[in-house]
Image (tube, helix red, strand yellow):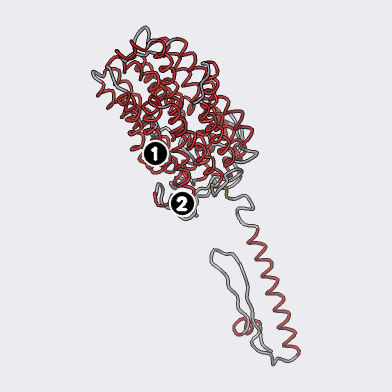
């Protein structure tokens, strides 16, 4: 009679992988000329081996992950949930956004004053805005690369000091050329502002992520309202240099608060710094009075961080190209309305006193004009309830389409003759819907890209936004001065194009887990 060893050596074999897991057992009967006893023993042995296979599969299925022995950073963020940790993070990142809004809105209120002081033409004033966005366009991919390679927190320290330093130096500009140079350097620092948005995104659980990022738009609106209010008080009394200095101070104050800002746990995991990531997550759980999942934090194989070619991988190529167009249109339209609001009001004022205006190029904003700008800025708050209602119901893509299409329609209405009260309402709606579109592109871009290229993806997309912002002054300030109809049709057409582009985006990020790396 043949022994079990004979069957194992001749007709029966098993494949046992390393690390102690019995994944499968394969067997074959090579001989059929056995007597009855041999056949019985063979069948019994066959049943035993089959039983071993079933048991080994059961052991494998109850793996470490199922027993809770390991967990991912995504599991940890979901387990920590939403609490005081995220609220504190939101406040600090929100203040960073406010500081950025001060520097950006400064352009709209500063242009009429500089035009008057240095007798500038329209294209000179347009270039004041353009040079800021040239700096942003050139440095946006660089800050994104640094953020993915060296961390979000480190990059934010560099960006904050950069903005505050060159912003404050603008106060002492002896000529318009120096204003251009220093504002261009401020723009280069502002290019790193998406780092705070990415950091906030990476600590938000999926259920509250879209809502909290939408609410984040309040910080930008508050910054613009504050800048217009301060400008209405400071420019007529102390002059524009004091306004520039006051606008730069918040950046230095925020630099102190950055000590309370943790490094992104997702970044640390992608960088292979498992212990630091676990420490950050444990502190977050303690602040939220929550607990991490049982077991050990696992570090996924993330590959190279900050690799531009990953943006052009088959999985993300179409998304990247379409989002670059979306960011271009968004910034082109939003800053176009910001700049056009002051220009439209100046046209209204020049009609009242056209001779003086033409001779000295001075159409300074009046008190009522500042009020109109404040009211139109309040329009940015309408994007909040609209997008909160839509973004988790109809999805990210259709929310972007609604905002861009609505913006285009109200832009086209600006060509009609109307009293200033109705004009204020139309500007109110354009500002609100264009801000809603900005919220969409930020949220979608942060959600669609994996951790290894998230800030690079946002940074490069932001660079395309800066190209749009560079070009828009020549429409909102130069072309609009020649033909209001031609200018608004440029904005309206691009808005309609963006709405189609949003619908055709290949990936819907609603309810999607933030990816950690390129598959």
Counting from the top left corner in percent of width and height, residue 498 is at 50, 40
- State the SS at label 1: helix
Taking depth in this image into account, of 86 and 109 the one nearest to the observer is 109
Taking depth in this image into account, of 320 and 116 the one nearest to the observer is 116
Query: For mark 1, what is the residue?
Result: 463
Residue 498 appearing in the image: yes
Taking depth in this image into account, of 259 and 423 the one nearest to the observer is 423
Q: Earlier in the sequence, mark 1 or mark 2?
A: 2
Residue 89 appearing in the image: no
Is 27 rendered above or below residue 82? below
- For image coordinates 33% across by 38% down, the residue present is 138
Can you tell which quarter of the image residue 284 is in?
top right
Is 262 rendered above or below residue 307? above
Q: CA distance from mark 1 to mark 2?
A: 17 Å
The local crowd at label 2, few if under 14, some if 14 to 19, many if 20 or more residues have their Cα within 10 Å, is few
- State the SS at label 2: helix
Counting from the top left corner in percent of width and height, residue 115 is at 31, 18
- For image coordinates 53% across by 42% down, the residue present is 447
Which disc is residue 317 wearing?
2
């Amino acid at each position: 009679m043949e022994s079990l060893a004979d069957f194992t050596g001749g007709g029966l074999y098993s494949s046992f992988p390393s690390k102690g897991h019995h994944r499968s057992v394969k067997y074959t009967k090579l001989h059929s000329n056995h007597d009855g006893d041999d056949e019985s023993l063979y069948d019994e042995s066959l049943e035993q081996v089959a039983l071993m296979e079933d048991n080994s599969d059961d052991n494998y299925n109850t793996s470490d992950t199922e027993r809770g022995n390991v967990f991912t950073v995504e599991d940890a963020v979901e387990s920590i949930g939403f609490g005081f940790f995220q609220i504190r993070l939101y406040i600090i990142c929100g203040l960073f956004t406010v500081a950025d809004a001060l520097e950006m809105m400064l352009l709209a209120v500063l242009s009429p004053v500089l035009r008057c002081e240095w007798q500038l033409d329209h294209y000179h004033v347009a270039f004041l805005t353009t040079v800021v966005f040239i700096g942003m366009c050139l440095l946006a991919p660089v800050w994104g690369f640094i953020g993915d390679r060296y961390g979000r927190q480190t990059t934010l320290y560099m960006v904050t000091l950069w903005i505050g330093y060159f912003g404050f130096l603008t106060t002492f500009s002896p000529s318009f050329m120096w204003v251009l140079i220093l504002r261009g350097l401020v723009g280069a620092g502002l290019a790193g502002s998406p780092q705070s948005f990415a950091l906030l995104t990476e600590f938000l659980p999926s259920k509250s992520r879209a809502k909290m990022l939408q609410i984040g738009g309040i910080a930008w609106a508050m910054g613009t309202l504050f800048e217009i209010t301060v400008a209405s008080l400071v420019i007529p009394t102390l002059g524009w240099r004091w306004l520039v200095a006051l606008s730069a101070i918040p950046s230095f104050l925020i630099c102190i608060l950055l000590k309370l800002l943790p490094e992104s746990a997702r970044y640390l995991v992608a960088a292979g710094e498992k212990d630091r990531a676990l420490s950050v997550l444990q502190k977050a759980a303690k602040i939220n009075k929550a607990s991490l999942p049982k077991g050990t934090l696992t570090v996924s194989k993330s590959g190279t961080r900050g690799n531009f070619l990953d943006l052009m991988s088959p999985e993300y190529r179409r998304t990247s190209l379409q989002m670059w167009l979306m960011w271009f249109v968004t910034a082109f339209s939003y800053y176009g309305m910001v700049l056009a609001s002051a220009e439209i009001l100046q046209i209204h004022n020049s009609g009242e006193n056209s001779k003086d205006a033409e001779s000295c190029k001075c159409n300074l904003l009046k008190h009522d004009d500042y009020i109109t700008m404040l009211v139109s800025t309040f329009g940015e708050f309408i994007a909040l309830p609209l997008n909160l209602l839509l973004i988790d119901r109809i999805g990210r893509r259709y929310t972007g389409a609604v905002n861009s299409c609505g913006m285009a329609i109200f832009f086209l209405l600006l060509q009609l003759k109307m009293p200033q009260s109705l004009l204020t309402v139309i500007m109110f709606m354009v500002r609100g819907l264009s801000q809603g579109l900005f919220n969409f592109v930020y949220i979608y871009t942060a959600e669609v890209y994996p951790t290894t290229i998230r800030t690079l993806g946002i940074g490069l997309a932001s660079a395309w936004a800066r190209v749009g912002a560079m070009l828009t002054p020549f429409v909102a300030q130069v072309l609009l001065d020649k033909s209001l109809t031609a200018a608004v049709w440029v904005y309206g057409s691009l808005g309609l194009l963006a709405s189609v582009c949003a619908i055709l985006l290949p990936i819907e990020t609603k309810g999607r887990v933030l990816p950690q790396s390129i598959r």
